Image: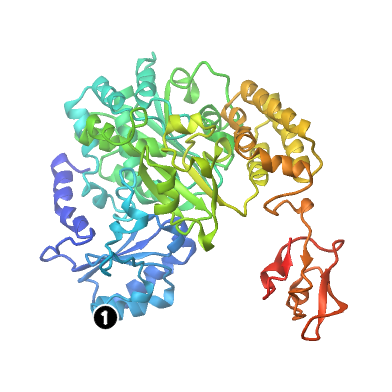
């Protein structure tokens, strides 16, 4: 067990080391002259970043550089589309798309020779032709990293490095200089709203649990992130697990709980491993246990692994699953703050919500509230995906226009395609059309235009996307993930999906669109939990902003050429040169030569519509663009 004095000595002893990982920081005498940070998030790990780290270690050992150069495996840097990533500090060299075989060149040319390997750099130049620092590049310039402040900076499996970023100082401040009610009041004053979906006041949630009668209470962390394309919570747990642990300790002090539960999906093996390591280290340091940090208070944590059911993101379904029961929602009231985990008052927040807590306690509510909008304070983390040049993990101040996210941070749609829509909130959210691209992103603005913040997924579509097909994709997901407990969700969404399927096949009528809209509102008004209540949102928002596409489908045409039942492939005889590439690559032999000849004397080809499976391979292979749909 470490005393408060020992914890402070660790903080001060490593602060300079962490500072050296910031671009332009001076090197402290006696410390390593360079730091190589390799991304250890799930995305880069899938691209062999572990092998890249091992290769760096081997190269440094062979050259006797292990004392001069510190090698660190960090969490996610955010720019996932450029991974695997490694950064060399204090030089600020941001290497992207690294392959294991590139490591020797980086060590030889940069670490030894002092000259960065330019072909691997993520480099942007200013108007004077000078390379920008990474923080001034388009992807990072408009961001403000509060929740993600340590991701890509510290070793998430080293508690000492978390301590060096003022780790566990917020808990110490709360317990030694604030009453539980003062902690809650500070969270209220900050204006922090829950980052898991509806955006309910975090301070009020804490207050309800604090006021609930009972000698035994719990705090729980919802880390069951199930939205398609969402990875915000996973990345925070992978890159800064102690931040969540410390926040739950503060919450436990505030509401009167001595035990915490982190419900995390088993599909997040790296996050689970780093949580296990962090909890073990916290126990060894006396930060978790019967006498937390020698301050006379008790708090402990345990992990409960989920099997990956989307409905378990709903807090009462999560509690059922965490107790070992079937993961389905409970009738509310009573709410978890009154009757939660094993029937005891329970505070539930999601990972990102907890990620803000320590900074509010350390810097004050006014500091936090100075960022964002009047009713949506602070920042929001998004998993930015879809048709963009830059996809990954971003954190922006609330109120940032969607245009800034799409065009500046995201780099716009590739290949000169036009932005068409953005889906926020995953299966529970809605689509924002291009006409509303200047909408400031916050809770109230999104609700006003028929979408929602949700947990933070943001998927961008371009002109090649069919909005009817997008709505169908999300509805298929929610139908599959429904627990089946209530009829409006179990049956209603199934019938809605069948109607939507008719639209994509060109079998629906305009009257069917009205029936779909009516059914959407019935499902929203009568479903038991948030999954069913929000499932129709993608359908309603696309009907609202892209009704012309629905009507076109009813008339037998998919404007984007996506819905296969409404698409036919044909060969332009004037463009065909008889090269046979289409026929040779067709997986079902649907393309053959005809008796007609091209200008070069070769036979013109044709597509048999009865055999064609509309896979699009022929279009991609044709060198003259002679095939269209």
- Can you say which quadrant of the picture contains the C terminus? bottom right
Q: Can residue 276 be seen in the rendering of this structure? A: no
Q: Position of residue 580 (x, y in %)?
A: 76, 79
The residue under the point 45% across, 17% down is: 338
**Name of the residue lying farthest toward the right:** 595
The residue under the point 73% across, 44% down is: 552
Vertical placement of residue 572 versus 20, above or below:
below
> Nearest the camera: 96 or 280?
96
Q: Position of residue 247 (x, y in %)?
A: 32, 35
Q: Quadrant of residue 146?
A: top left
Q: Quadrant of residue 431?
A: top right
Looking at the rendered structure, the secondary structure element under dot 1 is loop
**Name of the residue lying farthest toward the top:** 213
Q: Position of residue 545 (x, y in %)?
A: 60, 37
**Name of the residue lying farthest toward the left:** 29
Q: Position of residue 529 (x, y in %)?
A: 58, 26
Write down the residue under mark 1: 63
Relative horizontal placement of residue 10, taking residue 598 as reference (left or right)? left
Q: Residues within 10 Å of mark 1 (few under 14, many from 20)?
A: few
Q: Can residue 587 be seen in the rendering of this structure? A: yes
Task: Give the total of numbered labels.
Answer: 1
Q: Quadrant of residue 591?
A: bottom right
The residue under the point 23% across, 59% down is: 21
> Nearest the camera: 240 or 152?
152
> Nearest the camera: 330 or 260?
330
Vertical placement of residue 433 versus 349, above or below:
below
- Can you say which quadrant of the picture contains the N terminus? top left
């Amino acid at each position: 067990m470490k005393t408060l004095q020992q914890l402070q000595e660790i903080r001060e002893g490593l602060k300079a080391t962490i500072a050296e990982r910031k671009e332009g920081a001076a090197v402290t005498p006696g410390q390593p002259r360079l730091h190589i940070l390799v991304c250890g998030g799930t995305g880069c790990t899938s691209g062999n970043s572990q092998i890249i780290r091992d290769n760096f270690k081997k190269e440094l050992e062979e050259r006797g550089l292990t004392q001069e150069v510190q090698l660190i495996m960090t969490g996610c840097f955010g720019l996932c589309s450029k991974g695997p990533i490694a950064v060399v500090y204090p030089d600020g060299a941001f290497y992207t798309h690294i392959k294991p075989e590139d490591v020797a060149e980086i060590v030889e040319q940069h670490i030894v020779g002092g000259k960065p390997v330019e072909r691997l750099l993520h480099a942007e130049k200013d108007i004077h032709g000078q390379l920008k620092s990474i923080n001034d590049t388009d992807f990072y310039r408009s961001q403000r990293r509060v929740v993600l402040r340590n991701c890509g900076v510290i070793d998430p499996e080293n508690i000492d490095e978390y301590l060096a970023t003022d780790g566990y100082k917020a808990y110490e401040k709360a317990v030694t200089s604030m009453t539980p009610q003062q902690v809650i009041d500070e969270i209220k004053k900050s204006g922090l709203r829950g980052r898991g979906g509806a955006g309910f006041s975090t301070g009020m949630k804490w207050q309800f649990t604090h006021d609930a009668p009972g000698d035994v209470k719990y705090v729980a962390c919802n880390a069951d992130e199930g939205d398609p394309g969402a990875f915000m919570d996973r990345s925070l747990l992978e890159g800064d697990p102690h931040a969540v642990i410390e926040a739950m300790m503060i919450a436990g002090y505030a509401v009167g709980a001595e035990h915490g539960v982190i419900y995390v999906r088993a599909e997040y093996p790296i996050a689970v491993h780093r949580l296990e390591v962090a909890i073990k280290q916290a126990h060894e340091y006396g930060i978790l246990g019967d006498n937390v940090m020698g301050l006379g208070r008790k708090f402990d944590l345990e992990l409960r692994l989920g099997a990956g059911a989307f409905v378990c993101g709903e807090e009462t379904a999560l509690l059922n699953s965490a107790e070992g029961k079937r993961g389905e929602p409970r009738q509310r009231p009573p709410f978890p703050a009154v009757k939660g985990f094993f029937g005891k008052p329970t505070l539930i927040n999601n990972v990102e919500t907890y990620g803000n807590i320590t900074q509010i306690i350390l810097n004050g509510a006014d500091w936090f509230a100075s960022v964002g909008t009047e009713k949506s304070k602070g920042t929001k983390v998004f998993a930015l995906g879809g048709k963009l040049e830059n996809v990954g993990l971003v954190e922006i101040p609330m109120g940032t226009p969607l245009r800034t996210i799409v065009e500046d941070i995201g780099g716009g749609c590739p290949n000169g395609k036009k932005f068409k829509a953005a889906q926020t909130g995953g299966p529970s959210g809605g689509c924002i059309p291009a006409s509303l691209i200047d909408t400031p992103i916050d809770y109230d603005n999104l609700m006003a235009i028929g979408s929602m913040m949700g947990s933070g997924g943001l998927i961008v579509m371009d002109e090649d996307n069919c909005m009817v097909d997008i709505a169908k994709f999300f509805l298929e997901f929610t139908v599959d993930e429904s627990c089946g407990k209530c009829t409006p969700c179990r049956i209603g969404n199934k019938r809605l999906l069948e109607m939507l399927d008719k639209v994509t096949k060109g079998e629906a009528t305009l009257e069917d669109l009205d029936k779909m809209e009516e059914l959407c509102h019935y499902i929203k008004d009568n479903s038991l939990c948030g999954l069913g209540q929000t499932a129709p949102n993608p359908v309603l928002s696309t009907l609202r902003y892209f009704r012309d596409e629905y009507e076109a489908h009813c008339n037998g045409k998919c404007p984007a050429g996506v819905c296969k039942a409404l698409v036919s492939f044909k060969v332009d005889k004037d463009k065909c040169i008889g090269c046979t590439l289409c026929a040779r690559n067709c997986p079902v032999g649907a393309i053959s030569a005809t008796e007609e000849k091209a200008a070069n004397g070769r036979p013109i080809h044709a597509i048999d519509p009865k055999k064609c499976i509309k896979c699009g391979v022929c279009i991609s292979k044709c060198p003259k663009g002679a095939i269209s749909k």
